[in-house]
Image (cartoon, grey):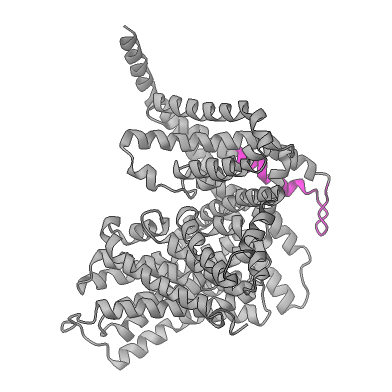
Amino acid sequence: MAAHAEGAIAGAGEAMSPRRRSRAASLEATLAMLVEIPAALLVVAEIVILFAGVVARYGLRSPLIWSDELASILFLWLAMLGAAVAFRRSEHMRMTAIVASAGPGVRAYLDVVATCAALAFLLMIAWPSYEYAYEESFITTPALQIANIWRAAALPVGIGLMALFAFLRLARAGDAWIVLSAVLSVAVLIGIFWLAQPWLRPLGNINLIIFFVGVAGFCVFAGVPIAFGFGLAIFGYLALTTRTPLMVLVGRMDEGMSHLILLSVPLFVFLGLLIEMTGMARAMVAFLASLLGHVRGGLHYVLVGAMYLVSGISGSKAADMAAVAPVLFPEMKARGAKPGDLVALLAATGAQTETIPPSLVLITIGSVTGVSISALFTGGLLPGVVLAITLSALVWWRYRAEDLSHVRRARAGEVVRSFVVALPALALPFVIRAAVVEGVATATEVSTIGIVYGLVIGLLVYRRFDWRRLGPMLVETACLSGAILMIIGTATGMAWGLTQSGFSRALASAMTGLPGGSAAFIAVSIVAFTILGSVLEGIPAIVLFGPLLFPIARAVGVHEVHYAMIIILAMGIGLFAPPFGVGYYAACAIGRVDPAEGIRPIWGYLLALLAGLIVVAIFPWISIGFL
């Protein structure tokens, strides 16, 4: 009888669910449009404001004293609205290796649990974010002379929008019982921690393991978006084991997300999309193919070189791979290359080019550790060359017997013609680099010069500018940037919690006391950041551990730029290493290759990358010789 009643209730729920889902989907689509349009306009506004600042300061010798302040105000709004867009599109970064291996029923349950966990964090942080914005209303900005609440209000608004999207996603869920069980699961776990508060407080720094390893690790492996897993860990630690006002956490998130140097993140993401849309990336790859296409393994060398060049422009690994793979893969497959080997090399080149400026990871390191971004940009060029050499050596070995009897060598005239066509695109990395070195623009502003250059070349030279793609590109830029910045915000809160607990001092004394001095410190760092890169990706790992480990590197005599190159490359290897590295699966998605096909060939490329990393670690001159 009970089973029959249960079935009747389930049937009623299923009968009502299509209408409920339809209303929720309609409301979500309307709300999405109301969020995406302002987010796209904010990207345009940031480009215009920063480029106007460069022109006024360098061209007219009359700097705009308010430009940086206005850019900072709009940037926080861009970050929060972008995070809301990313939440609605389910594009916040998450570790899905374990979730993907589960059965359909468990996977559906874990997906709803991930939404419920994110919603729980958003609801708990909503009131502290309102309090923080209210407190900021008493502060007046120095240049514009307006209340700072105009900037700080972005936090509660963005949090509220993400919470609303979470509710709508739950309303659209097909199985009411899965939703109910997921909600109860999250509520029970939160309730257990709340009731355990009297036992947690006396544990001291053991709570760091419980929350920052246990809670954060459980959330990440359960498929909760990384930003919200970090947020739950630091919120629980502060709320249940300390007397710190939770408004402080919102302040640390604000500090992490709104650092002006991070404004280069959305701008370089947009630049990467722009060079793909205008055909600049295709022109560069076509020139390299005409130069090396007749050599054994030639197009594999082209892939390595093209990724190096494109990485110097876009700063986004996904944009880099998306620009190169569609151009090269069809011809490489026609020559007999196996799809698994292609996607393995594509992933390896993604790791190889992590240090090529203007890398988002380099910019992030500079913003959280105080290391000169100009020095990082200079130091990142040669390590990428070293890893390109080790990858090319493996390509030579694997393809030394390739049959090229059917391949026609490009004539000298064709090579020259493709070079002339590619020259405007090839010049872009040098334009960006020169603008920073000559002091024309800061590391934040230089991306706007690249964008204007790309617009002019796309419109006047390549004439492939598709105005219809501009809107989606701007929304995609805001979406990816919001996902990245949300991680930086919550990871900054975790890093602050670690520092306040005294963990950083204990870690420093332990690392500086390692036998073997700087060599042991570097070896431990390589192992640690390879693992962190596989689990957390580069940016969250850097924000979380960079402020702790860079002072230790200086204390044991390791140059900070050299250390930055080592850990970036180590994280890159982890990021693109299966089975956990999400970069590998991104490469497979872009190359449209089954991940299982690339598992075997990628290990050889990863060993080649590791050999290059060891060379970079042993010889500091590679990183700091031109500083």
* Residue 570 can be seen, yes or no: yes
Q: Tell me: residue 388, above or below residue 570.
A: below
Front residue of 267 and 588: 588
Give the left or right position of residue 90, taking residue 37 as reference.
Answer: left
| Side of 474 relative to 393 (left or right) | right
Residue at x 34%, y 9% (from the top left corner): 2
- Residue 271 in view: no
Q: Is residue 147 magenta?
A: yes
Q: Say if 11 sits above or below 436 in the image.
A: above
Q: Which residues are magenta?
A: 139-160
Between residue 210 and residue 569, name the one nearer to us.
210
Q: Is residue 155 magenta?
A: yes
Side (left or right) of 343 relative to 384: left
Which residue sits at x=69%, y=40%?
129
Give left or right: position of 168 versus 151: left
Q: Residue at x 68, y 34 (%)?
A: 201
Q: Residue at x 25, y 73 (%)?
A: 331
Q: Position of residue 272 (x, y in %)?
A: 48, 66
